[in-house]
Amino acid sequence: MCGIGGIISKSGENVVPLVGMMLSRMAKRGPDGAGIATENSLVRSPSVQSLDFDSVKGSRVLGHARLAIVGGTCGSQPFCSCDGRVTLEHNGEIYNYKKLKAELGSHNFSTLTDSEVIVHMLEERLKAGAGFVDAIKDVVSELDGIYALAIRDEKTGMIALVRDRLGVRPLYYGENDRFVAFASERKGLWQVGIREPTMRVLPGHAILITPEGRLSKVQVADAPALKKPAYRTMKSAVAAYEKAFLASMQKRTEDVDRIGIIFSGGIDSVLVAHAARKMVPEVVCYTAGMEGSHDAEYARTIADELGLELHVKELTQDDVERLIPEIIDVIEDNNAGQVEVALPVYCAVQLASRQGMRIMLTGQAADELFGGYSWYANVAEKQGYRKLREHMREDLMLLYKETLEREDKITMAHSVEMREPFLDPGVIETSMEVDMRLNVRRNDRFGKRVHRRLAQKLGIPKDIAFRVKEAAQHGSGVHSAIDAIARKRGFDESAVTSGYLKILESQERVGSSQRYGYLFEKEQKMWIAEPHVQMYLDSLVNAPVLAKKT
């Protein structure tokens, strides 16, 4: 995990100082090394703070801040190919890099990192005569992992910004009259004067930037394909899922001696923690919530029953009120739903970081893959299982907006690398081949039954495997706390105008329950629930941010 950024001047001005400002704003993403690559120079340093931005000049500059996980202390980026044709910086993890490295020809590797393999793969494709975009497509098709890449072709001056097919790692860009800029976080762009609109590099796509600053978009990776069910019995589905899930966990725990789990007590994080304990010498679970909250108490009960080490951060209302502005700054959003979910995760990661954790696992995406949301049964009832599968894939492909970008920023704010076992290609492919009738039944309050049955097979008691968990903001007690804070500050139902409601109603519906709420009246209202809370959060940042960014 790292922070990447860069600027392409439209007039040839020296933009190195501006890249320095961007990296400094995102320095927590990479405390273990830094580097900048201009057209003619490459400078590296142990940290952003010690990097000499005055020693070089350039108008097309890449900058990088490194969090050292793979490859030890030696691995600061950007990297250059042996022939000098390609300059690259990478944020993410490539789990099959050792295999890919062994398949390469003779190259001068200066580090043991997974990232450096990518630049030499591109070098070989270009030497073989592939065009710049075709070389990128070919290389990313072989990467088993997650990535946000900035690639500069020194022959043509073209720069490509590339994002993995699910958008697990964020990458944003924007422009003004002077330059085009890109960064791992929007605040990097804001730091150099680029305000809204800032755009995302979309999952599975590349943004191409010419030396003159012209932009174009191209798709470089396909979304996971819908498939005919291959597993039509519970036994065959669980067996296939077990193989894929344990392989995913093995990849994400290889050579790791100590790992943290974002632990809510729900079956997703319980399954991850239970499996990790058999692969990693030290596994520690972390949760956060209001004093006496359901999630905190249930997490303690489950941890005791399964013998898991658990650390709990209990919050007061004063803690929540103090943290809200900090959360908004970190996640770059003041949407009420985003803030409420982010707050307990932020506190759990903060606790882990203070105890020296560098890598954490999350249970994200199990619901979208195996049908874990309660409203999925209603979709199946009203529209059929084929349509349900289409909705679930749409949910998976929109996770980057709903959860992944938020949690990347939270973990990076504490210099912690997040890994997502359920987003492994093998797990995704297996889930797509499971007959949906095995996972979601009509009038089903549980869902993801294959997922729960695997938990039982691996030794998790049935009462834990089939627990129905509250939404994070409710189970943690944070929703009620923020509601109380808003009312204390003078924001209640009477403060909400019809005009303000129209503003809320016009915003993009990101969450799964929001998009499919038209099917059931209760969920239709959920996404604009408590508008007075949103009004309070808007008051903290001068103008509404909400979930409206492209």
Image (cartoon, grey):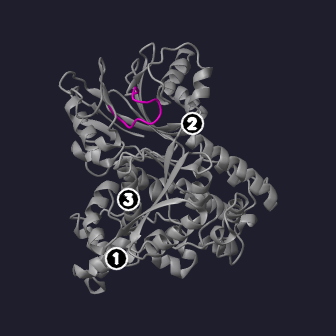
Question: Quadrant of the rendered structure where residue 457 is?
Answer: bottom right
Q: Residues within 10 Å of mark 2 (few under 14, many from 20)?
A: some
Q: According to the image, label 1 marks what residue?
A: 481
Q: Report the span colored magenta.
A: 63-75
**Residue 346, label in figure:** 3
Left of 411 or right of it: where is 536?
A: left
Tell me the amino acid under the disc marked 1: Ala
Whether residue 15 is visible to the viewer of this picture, yes or no, is no
Q: According to the image, label 2 marks what residue?
A: 95
Q: Is the N terminus in the top left, top right, bottom left or bottom right quadrant?
A: top left
In magenta stretch: residue 481: no
Q: Identify the secondary structure beneath mark 1.
A: helix
Left of 270 or right of it: where is 545?
A: left
Q: Nearer the viewer, residue 330 or 253?
A: 253
Tell me the amino acid under the disc marked 2: Tyr
Main secondary structure along the magenta-highlighted residues: loop
Whether residue 80 is visible to the viewer of this picture, yes or no, is yes
